[in-house]
Image (tube, helix red, strand yellow):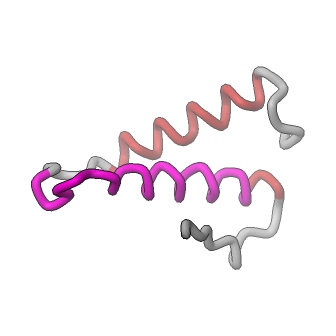
Amino acid sequence: MIRFDLRDEKTKEDKLTALVIQAIGAGSMCWSAVENAGTFRSGEALEVAHALIDALKKHGLTNVK
C-alpha cells in the first residue's frame, strides 16, 4: 500500500505539492532492478512535479491557487 506523509504541510497548496512530489518519487522506484536504474536526478523530478501542479491549476483541475 502506498502512503503519503503530510504531517508538516499546513496549506492546501503545500499538501498538493507534497503529494505530487512524493508520488513522482515513488513512481521513480518502480523498476524491476532499481539498483541498475542509474542516478536519480531530483532537481529534474522537482521540475516535473511543479510543471504538473502548474498544469493542474491552469486547466482548473484543482481549486488550489
Q: Where residue 53 appears, x then y in whole percent?
A: 66, 37
62 sits left or right of 52 in the view: right
- Which quarter shows the C terminus? top right
Q: Where residue 36 appears, x then y in whole percent?
A: 10, 54
Residue sitting at 44 percent across and 58 percent down?
A: 26
- Which residue lies most toward the top here? 59
Residue sitting at 82 percent across and 56 percent down?
A: 12
Residue sitting at 80 percent across and 31 percent down?
A: 61
Q: Where residue 44 appears, x then y in whole percent?
A: 36, 40
Dividing the picture into quadrants, the one containing residue 32 is bottom left
Magenta range is 14-36
Dividing the picture into quadrants, the one containing residue 55 is top right
31 sits left or right of 38 in the view: right
Dividing the picture into quadrants, the one containing residue 35 is bottom left
- Which residue lies most toward the left here? 36
- Which quarter shows the N terminus? bottom right
- Which residue lies most toward the right here? 63
Whether residue 32 appears in magenta in the rendering, the answer is: yes
